Image (cartoon, rainbow, N blue to C red):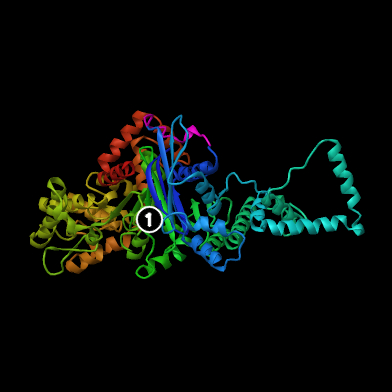
Amino acid sequence: MSILRVQIENYKSIKKCSLSLSDINILIGENGSGKTNVISAIKYFYDNLLIPCNDESIFDVNNKYSNCIKISITYNLYNLQKRCKQQLSANKSPHLSYFQKIVNMGTKGLITITLVKTKDKKVLWKGCNEKERALLHDLVPLYLIDSRALDLTDWSNLWEHIGDVVKTENKTSQLIKKDINNIVTNEDYRLKNFYDELKKAFGNANVKVEKFTPKKYARVLSQVYFEGNEFDFKDNKLYHFSNGTNSFNYTKLLIEILILISEKKMKSPFIIIDEPEISLHHKLVDELSERILLTNKNIEFLISTHSPRMIKNIMMNDSENSNVFHVRTIEQYSFISKMRLFNAKTENKSKIRITDQHANAYFSRLLFSIEGETELELFENKFIKELFPVLKQADIINKVMSDDVVKKIISPKIRRYSTPMVALVDMDKVIVKNKDINSFKIKTDLFKDYHVDNERYYYTEKRKKTYIARKRIGAMAQKCRFNYLLPFFSSVDTNYETFLGTIKNYFKEYGLVVAETTAEGMLINKDNQFKFWDFAKKYIFKSNNINNIELHYNSFSRNDKLNFLRLLFEGKSDYILKLDEIKTFNPGIANNLYNVIMDNRIIKTSGWVSRWIEFFLCSTLNIDYDDQNTYKNFKKTIENKSMLEKLQSEFIDNFGEIYEVILIMEKAIKS
């Protein structure tokens, strides 16, 4: 790699950033996050290397007092200088003085030059003179492919780069010209008279033909050699092919040409590709990724992409020589974090298991981790998304907290990217009832994900909410003997409620929401249990079984009715026990009660979650629940601000735990 570091200050949306580069560098992030501004800053730097290029749109539009931008690039010329020294030792090249200039640049192969531009003033350069800038422009040339602006059927600009490959030293050019003149003057070809007449015509018109530069001469010579200047693919014109095919072939051919330049010339190309995946089938993304990965080390890439496929390919195959930079907008400014890629020795499982879906998480505005089908159906419901639009901004990912390998792939904390993440887990991920005594055991798996050892060093309120709270949770689990009621191990013990509340508040400090029981318990709770019972009787339970269910339901206290309903819908009781566990801890449970639950249980994926949420929302607004236009009518109704606020208020009163999750998501996305 020849560009070691890029530093940018006060350029458009970038207050300050420093990118340490490798052979392959990827920029990811949402549209508008600032990826293009990184590319634009580098291009502006290169545009000014040879001649001043004024552009007043480069300044910070959010701060009128910010009137000075700085862009610094640190070049690593070690490999180029090594090649130059070999040429100098051989003492055969006609370009020895040129090679010596390269060897003399920088300190130990490193040179940093800085562009400073102040409003209404000329560009200033620090760290080099004009000749050195011209030399760097030639040694580390910039090539930019903007897939959105590419003319996919006109590849004529490729001849410029081909000319770079073929361009020869002056002595060789003179020999070629001599050979061409010999052919033209050869009487067998009968060309001499034509050219003599043309020369005379030019002279009479007082017109001269400007001579080619060596590069242009090489370009035309190449076109003569290939007998044309238009590119075809598989013997067909380019317009016969799709945009994807042409974009892929253009990019691939340019890379091949630049490889030749890096091998045959004293150059180390720097290639920027903006959204190379546009119009490409994922198999072509795979092929392009592979070509980039196999490119020699004399070429450096900076790629801006929205393709999870490309990120996955890079992370699976070349973490050691690659960087992924995550760009995120916070309060109108771009913040760039360097992701931690997989360690080939210690994270091989994660490297092997990463999928497109996992890589998609790196592009999210907000990650929401869940643990089961109930949560997925709940938070993907289109009605609740209309009620709380923050849910539309979240990408839901499943079982991150319970799968250690997936957690290592996706977790922003582990991978070190700046996307906020909210996780929802059941209470049984934290505590489990002991078998022999009326107490709870603390599971340590969740605690190990956080730096709990640092909590003792926190001050005042933060220490109280973390370190002291965690110690209290452990003590209560070990020492407290909470009151419970059979048959379901239900509990109205205020100390037990305090225990669960302390757990919830502790993990909330780390962006983790712990349900009091399960997701089913969030949907069926003490605030809505009677509404839910009316709904279930009418729409869920089979009519021939409802009498037996209702007979048992009516025999219970209010809290046992709630536990009974949760168990019927594959939830858990207050003591975080499912039906089979209750049977184990309470073998004396009545068979007819056990059987009525077993025989009438509603499975998680039956659709009851969506039906319950939609029934509640529609009945609150007096909208027909089972109408084919229900969703359309619902959306139209909540366009009225007062109706929306009324519905949100009712939802909060009846689904407090669900709203708690939504509040944390809203807070996270603003952070």
499 relative to 82 in the view: left or right: left
- Expressed as whole percent of the image width and height from the top left, the position of residue 251 reads 60, 55
- Residue 630: x %, y % from top left: 44, 39
What residue type is disc 1 on? Met
> Where residue 566 sits: x, y (%)?
26, 55
Judge whether residue 39 is colored magenta.
no
Q: Which residue is mark 1?
A: 339
**Does residue 604 appear in this view?**
yes
Left or right of 331? Residue 98 is right
Instruction: Answer above or below: position of 595 versus 121.
Output: below
Would residue 58 be counted in the magenta stretch? Answer: yes
615 relative position to 181: left or right:
left
Of 303 and 484, which appears nearest the observer? 303
Placement of 544 over or under 46, stated as above or below? below
- Residue drawn where x is 76% and y is 54% of the image: 228
Q: Position of residue 6 (x, y in %)?
A: 42, 49
- Find the magenta span and give its range: 53-65
Q: Residues within 10 Å of mark 1 (few under 14, many from 20)?
A: some
Q: Quadrant of residue 68?
A: top left
